[in-house]
Amino acid sequence: MKQIYVGNLPYKSTEEEVKKLFSQYGEVSSVKLITDRETGRARGFGFVEMDEESAKAAIQALDGEEFEGRRLKVNEARPKKFH
């Protein structure tokens, strides 16, 4: 499984909409949109998990594409760095 970072999402996007968008390129195992701990509002980014081949296709096809009026930033998720 490969984790994909999806940035610049419209704040009103739902996990279901993101899953539908990525499903065009293969089976989506999970979608996690990040919300603000304090307010519970969407922060405009999230993570999608897919198999390796589907992930590559989705990244290539969706990076820079417009989704609900915003240009998506889509790339392979990098491990979180702890300081």
Image: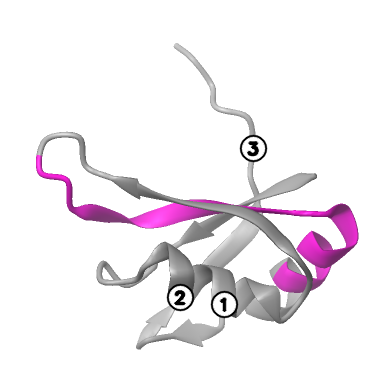
78, above or below 60, in the image = above
* Amino acid identity at mark 3: Arg
Tell me, yes or no, whether the highlighted magenta stretch contains residue 53.
Answer: yes
Which stretch appears magenta?
39-58
x and y, in percent, of residue 66 in the image: 48, 86
Q: Mark 1 points at which residue?
A: 20
* Residue sitting nearer the eye, 33 or 62: 33
SS at circle 3: loop
Please give left or right for residue 73 compared with residue 51 in the image. left
Circles 3 and 1: CB distance less than 8 Å?
A: no
* Amino acid identity at mark 1: Lys
Please give left or right for residue 69 compared with residue 48 in the image. left
18, above or below 82, in the image = below
Circles 1 and 2: CB distance less than 8 Å?
A: yes
* Residue sitting nearer the eye, 44 or 33: 33
Closer to the eye: label 3 or 1:
1
Displayed quadrant of residue 36: top left
The numbered mark, 3 or 1, whose residue comes first in the sequence reads 1
Numbered mark located on residue 31 in the image: none
Q: How far apart are marks 2 and 3 (CA)?
A: 23 Å
Circles 2 and 3: CB distance less than 8 Å?
A: no
Q: Name the residue under label 3.
A: 78
x and y, in percent, of residue 55 in the image: 77, 61
Q: Mark 2 points at which residue?
A: 17
SS at circle 2: helix
What residue is rendered at 52% in x and 59% in y?
6
**Residue found at the far left of this picture:** 39
What residue is rendered at 79% in x and 71% in y?
26
